[in-house]
Amino acid sequence: MHLDDLDTPALLIDEPRMTRAIARMQSHIDALGVRLRPHVKTSKCVDVALRQRAAGGCGITVSTLKEAEEFFAAGFDDIVYAVGIAPQRLPQAFALMRRGCALQIVVDSLAAAERVAAAARHEALAPRVLIEVDVDGHRAGVPPESPLLLDIARTLHAAGALAGVMTHCGASYECRDQAALVAMAEQERSRCVRAAERLRAAGLPCEVVSVGSTPTAHAARSLPGVTEVRAGVYVFYDLVMAGIGVCAPEDIALSVLTTVIGHQPAKGWVLVDAGWMAMSRDRGTLSQPHDQGYGAVCDEAGALLPGWIVAQANQEHGIVEHRDGAAAAGDVVARFPIGMRLRVLPNHACATAAQHARYAVVEGDAVRHLWPRFGGW
């Protein structure tokens, strides 16, 4: 198959770019002497995860139990479910454990720990549970110096369920230069390690010290006290990562192939058949110095067309404009004729991928593979 054989909109993976991205992260984390546990929520694709495992990834991270089920069925049995466990999900998680999945689950409150401990005793099971640590005030977790950390840990330990601590430094997405990223990576490491040290000082076990986000994983300079790093979007990258400085736009492996279907010449508009149903509504670059609208536009071969973005999006229509307006756009009818194919780089790879059921894996204009992806919870 070739690109011309694909209907649009179509979700593409540039295979050479993805391969370089996987190797880059794996090499960096290997050099730091810890395990890399890829987060597969970005791709939700077994074929992509197999590439990450072949490169040296140890286990996987998931965001849903649907992911855990799918990947366990495909032979991945070392899994961290990195979202606080809802009580009604415990039977499903325990069933996975009984089937041989080394599934680790997460809590960040005493109430959740008590529910897990009670269920574990009732089921005569000893699950592996990680306590989420808040290292940046971004989202969930227990502050590393909080007395609650030890209360949660003792509750889990009494049920034979305490495995360690984990964190996700979501505030890294707000960094804008390398120095800030390096500082945030060290903040993530030091605060999570501090939580582990407090557990051990209290006579409690703490085997796992798990940190991770793509920005901090790349920025980390040393990781003493850490046992593993979790990162996900690095497998494809996206415009948010490029805006942070983690990658260049030319490194982004994921794009949406689209076709020019119309024009509004007086406005400098090019209409394409990829609206927000193909790109998602994610506007993650809006707060960055360069707002990329709904995505940055490339030619069919994947070369960036400087200044051109999907500035507006309806359900099935994208409006491509030059960021400097109609005067800079020139003759859009001549430049972008009807039927012309373009690629659009996404703001948020996870959100854009979620709009599609499969990936067309390409090298140049050749379609090498068609890989399914899944959704759901």
Image (cartoon, grey):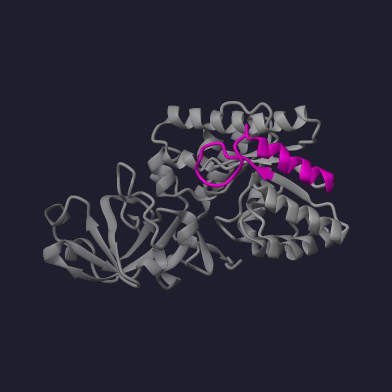
Residue toward you, 91 or 324: 91
**Does residue 188 appear in this view?**
yes
In the picture, residue 298 is in which quadrant?
bottom left
Q: Residue at x 47, y 52 (%)?
A: 253
Q: Answer yes or no: is residue 80 visible.
A: no
Q: Relative to residue 299, is residue 229 drawn left or right?
A: right
- Residue 150 horizontal/vertical position (percent): 72, 37
Query: Is residue 199 or residue 255 the one in the foreground?
Result: 199
- Queried whether the magenta region covers residue 327, the answer comes back as no
Q: How many marks?
A: 0
User: Looking at the rendering, which quadrant does residue 179 occupy?
Assistant: top left
The answer to whether 192 appears left or right of 73 in the picture is left
Q: Residue at x 61, y 50 (%)?
A: 39
Residue span colored magenta = 131-159
Percent of width and height locating residue 202: 77, 30
Can you say whether 250 is above or below 343 in the image?
above
Residue 318 lies, in percent from the top left, at: 30, 66
